[in-house]
Image (cartoon, rainbow, N blue to C red):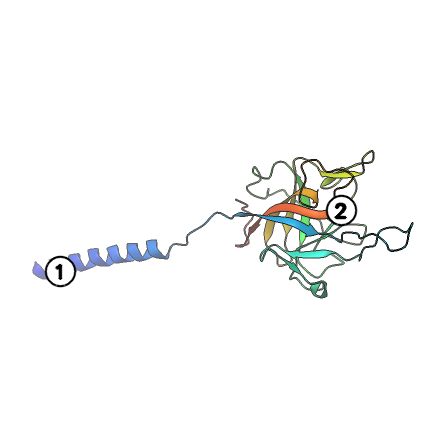
Amino acid sequence: MKITYQILLFTASLATLTACASDDDAPVVLPVQAQTVNNLPADPTTPSSTTGQPPLSTGKFTLYNLRDNKTVANTDSATNRWDVGFRGTTVIINGGAVRSGQGGAYVHTGTFEELTAIPATATFAQDQSATSLAIPTGSGLGWYNYNSTNNIITPVPGRVLVIRTGDGKYAKLEILSYYENAPATPGATSRSRFYTFRYVYQPDGSTKLN
């Protein structure tokens, strides 16, 4: 009887330890956090030194890594180290026939907060050429509207860029302003080609975005 009692006690203790170990080893799933990027230059123009000539620009994209929240040198443009690039109103993705990464994107209609997961029916496009891009260019087609009367670019309300990154992860990105210091009402003197945007990057490779 004593031996049987000791065996039962040992078995119960082992089960308790195993349960505790399982609880301790269970992965802790933390919500992903939104990041805000301010005044990211997207090939801003500078006045020409020659009177009557158009403003000068470099023609280069500003490449950005969403995982690390930092810009990437143009010398790394042929790698998967960057995810999204900005030049003027054009946004490129690191994926497709003209890119080396695994990226893709589509324009989601809805609010940033409500997009908590990528829909199973979502279709990601890729950049196929300089004129065939995952994020369409042109007023009302992609992320922005253009007002020809006052020459102002404004983000389309309720448009979110859903991005598959250069290394195959997922993110959502909302452009908030195209002007330096994100003025509430940009005007003729506002300096353009400076993006302010917020984004959520999911590092675990899932399509969950909150």
Which amino acid does the dot numbered 2 rest on?
Thr
Q: Residues within 10 Å of mark 1 (few under 14, many from 20)?
A: few
- For the N terminus, the quadrant is bottom left
Q: Which mark is residue 42?
A: none
Residue at figure coordinates x 63%, y 48% from the top left: 38
Q: Identify the residue at horizontal 10%, vertical 62% (top origin).
A: 3
**In the rendered structure, which amino acid carries the disc numbered 1?**
Gln
- Residue at screen point 41% across, 52% down: 28
Q: Which residue is mark 2?
A: 89
User: Which element carries disc 1, helix, strand or loop?
Assistant: helix
- Write down the residue under mark 1: 6
Left or right of 19, for residue 55: right
Point out the residue furthest to the top here. Answer: 149
- Residue 95 appears in the rendering: no
Residue, far right: 52
x and y percent of residue 83 in the render?
Answer: 66, 56
Residue 110 in the image: state x and y as whole percent. Answer: 63, 36
